[in-house]
Image: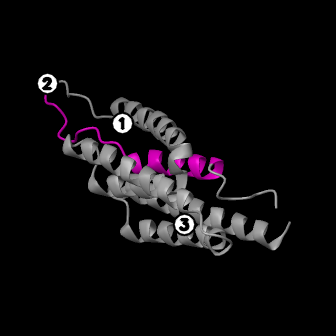
């Protein structure tokens, strides 16, 4: 394996570690730490730097920014209806920068399927009404950061940013 291939494997490992941290924190505290998102931004810059140094391709940058903007708008709509919190909005926008327009659909599908599975789990484990008819005070909540992390890992791997063969 070449040095570039090793570099890509290390960066993808960093992406997975940061996504794992974000997912774990969202599961535990229902918020994604900003430090994890900043770390993902650093990984993205490190991945794109060699490509930009070898010859600037404005199309690659524009499609990534467009994907981030599209995901941001969609996530803000979900936020407006209180379906996700603001940390999930930020996480999805950063994830879309890795996916680019080419893999934005994959990001959406994997995140949606994982989010649906998490939603089903949350409903299945929600405390039921007691025998006296009292409803549990805790509503069913979903840690969408877990779903976004899975979608990010899949979309980033499929995006061509990481060359695992070199």
Mark 3 or mark 1, earlier in chain: 3
Identify the secondary structure beneath mark 3.
helix
Identify the secondary structure beneath mark 1.
helix
Q: In the drawing, does residue 137 fall left or right of residue 77?
A: left
Q: Residue at x 51, y 46 (%)?
A: 101
Q: Residue at x 37, y 68 (%)?
A: 34
Question: Residue 100 at what x, y percent from top left?
Answer: 52, 51
Can see residue 25?
Answer: yes
**Label 2 to label 1: alpha-carbon separation:** 21 Å
Question: Residue 78 at what x, y percent from top left?
Answer: 27, 42
State the extent of the magenta-drawn residues as a range. 132-158
**Label 2 to label 3: alpha-carbon separation:** 52 Å
Image quadrant containing the N terminus: bottom right
Q: Residue at x 69, y 68 (%)?
A: 10
Taking depth in this image into account, of 85 and 57 the one nearest to the observer is 57
Q: Residue at x 56, y 58 (%)?
A: 60
Q: In the drawing, does residue 61 fall left or right of residue 118?
A: right
In the image, which disc is placed on residue 133?
Answer: 2
Q: Which residue is mark 3?
A: 44
């Amino acid at each position: 394996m070449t040095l570039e291939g090793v570099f890509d494997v290390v960066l993808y490992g960093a992406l997975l570690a940061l996504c794992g941290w974000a997912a774990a924190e969202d599961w535990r505290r229902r918020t994604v730490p900003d430090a994890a998102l900043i770390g993902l931004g650093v990984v993205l810059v490190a991945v794109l730097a060699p490509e930009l140094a070898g010859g600037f391709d404005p199309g690659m940058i524009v499609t990534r920014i467009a994907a981030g903007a599209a995901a941001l708008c969609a996530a803000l709509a979900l936020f407006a209806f209180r379906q996700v919190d603001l940390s999930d909005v930020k996480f999805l926008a950063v994830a879309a920068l890795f996916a680019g327009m080419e893999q934005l659909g994959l990001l959406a599908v994997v995140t949606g399927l994982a989010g649906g599975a998490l939603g089903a789990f949350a409903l299945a484990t929600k405390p039921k009404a007691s025998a006296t008819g009292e409803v549990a005070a805790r509503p069913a909540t979903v840690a969408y950061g877990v779903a976004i992390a899975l979608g990010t890992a899949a979309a980033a791997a499929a995006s061509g940013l990481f060359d695992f063969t070199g």
